Amino acid sequence: MEIAGYNMPEELYYDQYHFWTRVDGDELVIGMDDFAEKLAGQIVFVQLPFVGKAVTAGKKFAKVESGKWLGTVYSPADGEITAVNEELEANPTIINADCYGKGWMYRIKPADMSQINTLIHGGKDVLEAWLQEDIKKFKKD
């Protein structure tokens, strides 16, 4: 779904820092949303934590950098990193080109899948209200 020129798929869950989470079987796939990647500009670095690393819901576990921005990635759930997108090591701009597809960043095996229910999720009304608020905060014309 498009909101104010940003692609924000309804089926995804979003954290307050504009990273998305998608349920894929018994794992979670994490990436940067369209608003964040456009605001950040060209992504130049993605920290790839090691597979097997334990993560805690709401705690930082990785970083993403652009030429003008440094972002922190927070885990959406307690669990363990099961995969990282190693293509991002050589070409982090994949995030800018396809943030919801080839630009995925991490996979987590959550200890409790219900923890994602604390994230922003819902229909157009919920997502639009949240995104419009952040557009006002971050995009001062």
Image (spheres, grey):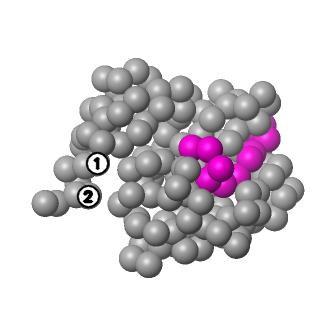
| Along the viewing direction, whichever of 53 and 93 lies nearer the viewer | 93
| Along the viewing direction, whichever of 20 and 38 lies nearer the viewer | 38
Majority secondary structure of magenta residues: loop
- Left/right of residue 44 with respect to residue 135 in the rendered view: right
Residue underneath mark 1: 134
Q: How dense is the environment of label 2, judged by Cα within 10 Å: few (below 14), some, or many (20 and up)?
A: few
Q: Residue at x 79, y 41 (%)?
A: 109
The location of residue 81, given as percent across then percent down, is 78, 52
User: Label 1, label 2: how many angstroms apart (C-alpha)?
Assistant: 6 Å
Residue underneath mark 2: 138
Can residue 117 be seen at all in this image of the molecule? yes
Residues drawn in magenta? 100-112
The location of residue 74, given as percent across then percent down, is 58, 54
User: In this rendering, is residue 131 above or below 68?
Assistant: above
Give yes or no for residue 103 being in the magenta stretch: yes
The location of residue 39, given as percent across then percent down, is 36, 60
- Which dot marks residue 11? none
Q: Residue at x 70, y 39 (%)?
A: 28
The three-letter code of the residue at mark 2 reads: Phe
Please report contact status of discs 1 and 2: CB closer than 8 Å, yes or no: yes
